[in-house]
Amino acid sequence: MASTGSVSPAGQTPAPEVISLQDISKRFVIRKDNSLKERLVTLGRAGRRHREEFWALRGLTAQLEAGQTVALIGHNGSGKSTLLKIIGGIIEPTRGTVRRRGRIAALLELGAGFHPDLTGRENVFLNASILGMSQSETEARFDDIVAFSGIGEFIDTQVKFYSSGMYVRLAFAVAVHTDPDILLVDEVLAVGDEAFQRKCLDTIKRFQTEGRTIILVTHSMGQVSELADRAILLHHGEVIQDGDPNAAIAAFRDLLESERRDQERDAPSNPVLENGRVLSASVQVAGRAADEPFQPGDDIVITTTLEHTSGIAEWVCAVQIDNVMGQPVWGTTTRRVGIELAPLEGTRTLALTVDDAMFAGGKYFVNVSLMDFAGRHLHDLVQATSFNVADQPDAAGSMYARPRFKVVD
C-alpha cells in the first residue's frame, strides 16, 4: 500500500520528505542446521532443504515528511522493528530503496551502541560518536546528558553492571542531546520507570513542537493516540492501514480479535468453554429517547442476555466501556459487586445500572463478556452496543466533573 504522506493545507508549502521508502522487502534465511558438522554435510543443493526463507517485509512503500510523528504498530513479528532498522540504516533491504535526509538518532535495542566493559562516561562518548557527534560537541553537552539520565553517581561504573532501566536512561539521554532531525524509538521506553517515561514523552512532545520527525514502535495504544499524527499498521510484513492513528488502532484491535477467535476455534474441544454466548446487549437512560445523547450524571442501564447450552455452574458476566480510541474507561463484573449467580443453562438476562455516570462528552462502546470462575473468556461480544454523551463546554477529558474557579488572592 503506498502512502504519499500528509496533505498540507491550501496555500501552505508542503513539508519536505525526510524519508522515502520505495518497494521495500527484507528476507531472512532461517537455517535448520543444528551444528557446524550438519552444515558442512548439507553444503550445496542439499542445503536448501535445511534452510527456510522468511520475508519480514514485502513491497512496502511510504513517504515520511518533516515534522510528522509516525507510529508503527502491529503484533509481534509483523516487521515493525525490521522496518525501523532499515530506516536507521542498521540493515539493508533485500529489495527496494531508502532515501534519508537529516541526522538520525536511533534507540532500537537495549544496550545497542554500548560496550559492556566500558563505563557510562566512556559509552556516552562512544554512542555520541556513532550518532555523528564530535568529541568537543559531546564534551559540551556531557553534563546535560548525565543530568537528564539521572544516573550521575554511576556514570563511572561499567555498564555491564547497569540495570535495564539505567541502560535506557543513558541511551535516551545521549540520543536526544545529539540534536537529531529524525528520532527512531523502538519500544525501549517501556523499560524505564513511570517518572522517566514521562520525561521521555515530554521530550518527544518538545521535539514535535520543534518540527522534528519521530518514528516510534510501541505496543502502547495510549502512546499512539497521544503522540502520533500518523500510524502505519503492519501485518506479516505488509501495510494494511496507513493514516489516522485512531483508525489504525481500531483496525489493529479488530485484527487481534480475529486472530484470538481463530486460536479459540483451533483449540481442543471443551464443551464448557465452547457453549457459552453473549447474545445481545442494549443501553438506555430512563426518560431519554433512543437517539438522544446522554448527560453526565445519568443513570445508565445496560441490559444483556447470555446463554449456555450445556450448562455452567459458576460463571461471571463482565462489562467494559471503551472510548473511541479503544481505551477502557470503566468496567465491572458480577464477581466484583458480589452478585451470586445461579448456574447458567439456557438463557439469562441481566441488567446493570451505572449510577450517576460522569462520562465526558463523546462516543462510548459497551463490551460484554461471559467468563468462568477461573477468568477464562467463554465469549466476548465486542462493541455490543454504544452510546453518546453530550459535549460539555466547561471541561474536557474521559470523565466529567463540574469546574469552579475562585480568586483567592
Image (cartoon, rainbow, N blue to C red):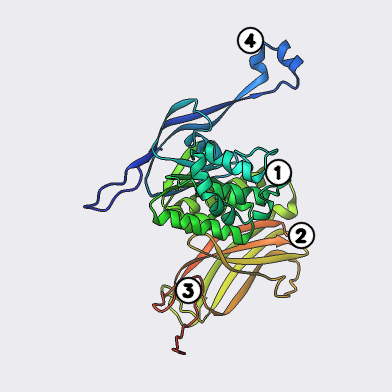
Q: Which residue is mark 4?
A: 45
Q: What residue would you read off at disc 3?
A: 360
Q: Residue at x 48, y 38 (%)?
A: 132
Mark before the other along the chain sequence, 4 or 3: 4
* Residue drawn at the location 46% of the way across and 79% of the way down: 295
| Frontmost residue, 100 versus 254 | 100
Residue under label 1: 158
Badge 2 element: loop
Amino acid, disc 1: Gln
Given the image, on which type of amino acid does mark 4 rest?
Arg
Disc with the residue nearer the chain's start (4 vs 1): 4
Whole-number angstrom distance, CA of label 4 to CA of label 3: 66 Å
Question: Is the residue marked by circle 4 packed among few (<14), some (14-19), or many (20+) residues within 10 Å?
Answer: few
State left or right for residue 378 relative to residue 256.
Answer: right
Three-letter code for the amino acid on which mark 2 is drawn = Ala
- Give 385 or 344, whichever is nearer the viewer: 385
The kind of secondary structure element at disc 3 is loop
Which residue shows up at 41% across the image and 79% down it?
394
Q: Read off the residue under disc 2.
A: 374
